[in-house]
Amino acid sequence: MHTTTRGALRVSGILVALATATSGCGPDAPADDTSGKSSGRPSAKSPSSSPAKQGLGDILVGGKAVTGSQPSGLAKIPYRRTYTDGALYAPVTGYRSMAFGASGLERVYDDVLGAGASGAAPGDVATTIEPAVQKAAFDALGDRRGAAVALDAESGKLLALVSTPSYDPAMFSGRSTKDAQAWKSVLGDSRSPMLNRALRQADAPGATFSVVVAAAALEQGLYTTVDDATVSPLAYVLPLSTTRVTGASSACVNASIRVALRLSCANVFTKWAAELGQDRLRSVAEKFGFDDDRLDVPLRVAESSYPQAGTSAPAAALTGIGAGDVRATVLQMARVAAAVANDGRLVPPRLVERVTTADGTARKPEAGAGSPVQAVSRGTAEALRAALGSGGKTGWVPGGGGDSAASWFIGHTETSDGRRIAVAVRVEGLAASAGADEDGGGRAAARVAEKILAGVGG
């Protein structure tokens, strides 16, 4: 689903926060969303690996296997895959089916996980996922359509990768009539449970993109500090248009970056997008990871994009509030939050910690997501953190109601042991109106994020 807002906009609802706590490919796509076979560099021997192990190799979360296998009785496919908490980890593991192939890490690391004719397990794949954080995100989202990502800002490790509603890959891991019926049921589900919404769905990011715009305003010299006053009328008329974009309150008149971020002043961000121009705004967006069509973790990630030249002046201005033709995955917006949390340094995200082969050789997977980059200066990152502050909030909900609305949240926390954790949440199909109930509007994503950050601990 693509949510595009044009014309008059309403400003209300969702929360975007970058707050530091001191205490602490299509919608139905069963087709693989991965980037290819596994590879890596040999390193140390792992004493825990057993060359004599029979069956399929396992995918590990928190050091424990969330997969297993049992004899199938068939010579060509000697083992059938089993799953522990299959729906919880499906966006990570993918599925392995005797009848329908494989996806996710099951497919990327088929050479490591698939048992050969001898029945010996080639090896195991250890992920970066933290069970408590994954479960906190999964439980918080419930059965709603949505996604959540938690990311260690300094290392790039994915601590949670959740997409809901989910599915249990154990339901069709075999080749019986029951498996075929389960497969058909999952494929026919209108909620698209097999779509990895965290990695494969790019949509209008709404007010979360205002963080990128604020960064561009500082990086490109539009303003010197986050407290500089702007010349911003409450109702900003889009260039070459009669459409007005109105700020959330009278405080949005001539609002500074600090005020504009906290109050979600759409009038300010659309004006800044027009003043910066597409080229300058795009250059900053790309440093945050937009327009990268090669990202994998190693699961393939859909491209997050900022519109190219040729966009109309009104549509270009609307990109300032994440509308127009801006598209972003939940992972991408978690990366924006992570870069701000990490002094402007953007570290490639990764889902796999190590691969251990049957002979005990452990190897790190090759970096498939590029190299660390300085997305914005340390000074800009520090200024944005200061502007948002502890509990700082700014919000925007795309126009329209029902299934066309979505709630977004990005934020970060610093745990008591010094880890900087970024989160991004998107919840679909919520009323985009002010005063919605506690589970509606933009409050939904913020509430999910609060529970995820609580699950991080510290």
Image (cartoon, grey):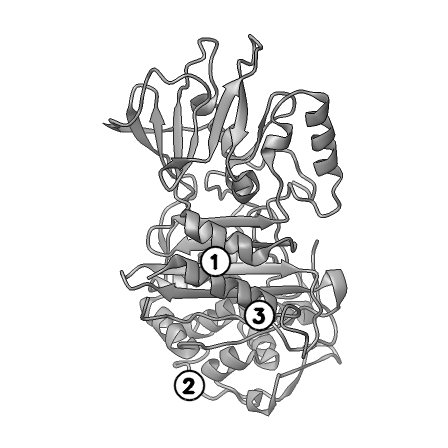
Q: 117 and 373: which one is in front?
A: 117
Q: Residue at x 41, y 19 (%)?
A: 121
Query: Label 2 sits on what residue type?
Result: Asp
Distance Cα–Cα, label 1 vs label 3: 14 Å
Q: Are marks 2 and 3 in contact (CB under 8 Å)?
A: no
Of callouts 1 and 3, the N-terminal one? 3
Q: 47 and 387: which one is in front?
A: 47
Distance Cα–Cα, label 2 vs label 3: 20 Å
Q: Secondary structure at mark 1?
A: helix
Q: Are marks 1 and 3 in contact (CB under 8 Å)?
A: no
Question: Left or right: 346 with respect to 267?
Answer: left
Of callouts 2 and 3, the N-terminal one? 3
Q: Residues within 10 Å of mark 3 (few under 14, many from 20)?
A: many
| Label of residue 227 in the image | 2
Quickly name the residue at label 3: 207
**Residue 72 horizontal/vertical position (percent):** 56, 15
